[in-house]
Amino acid sequence: MAAGLGISFLLDQEVLGGILVFFLLVAPFEKLYPRQKGQKIRRPLLGTDLAFALMAPLLNGVGIFAAVIIGGISLFWLPGLLMRPLVAEIPTALIPIVAFILFDFLGYWTHRWAHEVPLLWRFHAVHHSPEHMDWISGVRIHPFDGVLIAPAFFFLLAAGFDVEVTGILAVIQIALGIFFHANVRVRWRWLDRIVANPEFHHWHHANESDAIGHNYAPALPQWDLLFGTFFMPNRSSDRRPQRYGVDEYLPRHLIGLLTYPLRGARSIMRPRAVLAGLRSIAKDVQRSTFRPTHSVQRETAPGCLSTNQSLFEPATPERTLVDS
């Protein structure tokens, strides 16, 4: 934390002010309307998350550098160039809306691949390692994890969307991330399937068998409903997430979390190993994209609607809810 304070002060003095502002805005609501009652502000491993926040200027710089490389070699900008004439025909007033929908759609798939492609999960697991959910837990992100959204930015820029629009989308995503991780008791009820909320995202972080592998959408749950990964207890259920984190071992401090996904990286830096790794990632992405999904009612969670043909256990002949 001391190193983080020094680096933040040297690189971006506004980071400290931003942490304080978010704390003053969100912490009172976590006390007044807590999702997990009795959870203290000074909870276990708070120092680790604060260290991630204070080191953000340096970590973000590393992440942006990697994102530019990934965004360039991803070739996502090629279909963006093909769509440029179509984007030019969109009325100016609708440009931000179309950009938001496209960004959220691409965000859904990159988030889903981050969970379901083993090599990508090594980095994304750092974000899922907190065992307590609050506003500051959302900043525990490996800098190489965020590069997955880079192809979406390159796609939007190549398609002709303004740099300011894509920048605003990034700011919105950060703000929503803080809100969705907060320990607040918020549900939209009948809007649960239209707009994401803390309840939606807390279930995404829940380390409970029937909730794993769901709710990937950054802001619009319609993608999860459409592609079969939506999970939410119904309105009459009083079930709430009871367990967060991951089952696998991860270090509990900043340096360990930053280096853990890179262990063994030296052995895959040889050209042949790199090509083999890329082929493996491509196969895993294909498997994740086209795996079967359909609406099922899980008997282990009465009253909880899942639209995910479980990725982690064999399919069972459970009663379908497609028509209900």
Image (cartoon, rainbow, N blue to C red):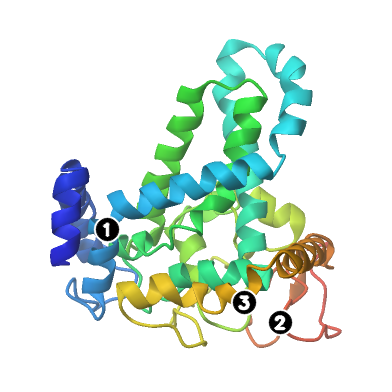
Q: Residue at x 14, y 58 (%)?
A: 5
Q: Which mark is residue 312?
A: 2
Of the numbered discs 2 and 3, the one sitting upstream in the chain is 3
Q: Residue at x 69, y 45 (%)?
A: 74
Asked if the residue at tag 1 contacts the one at tag 3, i.e. Cβ–Cβ closer than 8 Å, the answer is: no
Residue 170 horizontal/vertical position (percent): 45, 39
- The Cα atoms of the two marked residues, 2 and 3, are separated by 29 Å
Q: Residue at x 21, y 72 (%)?
A: 47
Q: Residues within 10 Å of mark 1 (few under 14, many from 20)?
A: many
- Of badges 1 and 2, nearer the viewer stands 1
- The Cα atoms of the two marked residues, 1 and 2, are separated by 32 Å
Asked if the residue at tag 3 contacts the one at tag 2, i.e. Cβ–Cβ closer than 8 Å, the answer is: no
Residue placed under numbered mark 3 in the picture: 267
Asked if the residue at tag 2 contacts the one at tag 1, i.e. Cβ–Cβ closer than 8 Å, the answer is: no
Instruction: In the rendered view, tell whether residue 323 sits above or below residue 158.
Output: below
Q: Which mark is residue 53?
A: 1
Let me know if residue 294 appears in the view. Answer: no
Amino acid type assigned to the residue bearing label 1 in the image: Ala
Q: Residue furthest front?
A: 270
Amino acid type assigned to the residue bearing label 2 in the image: Phe
Instruction: In the rendered view, tell whether residue 258 sits above or below residue 156.
Output: below
Front-most of 60 and 46? 60
Q: Residues within 10 Å of mark 2 (few under 14, many from 20)?
A: few
Let me know if residue 173 appears in the view. Answer: yes
Report which quarter residue 158 is drawn in: top right
Instruction: In the rendered view, tell whether residue 91 sits above or below residue 18.
Output: above
Numbered-mark total = 3
Report which quarter residue 323 is drawn in: bottom right
Residue 63 horizontal/vertical position (percent): 44, 51
Q: Quadrant of the N terminus?
A: bottom left
Residue 38 horizontal/vertical position (percent): 23, 79
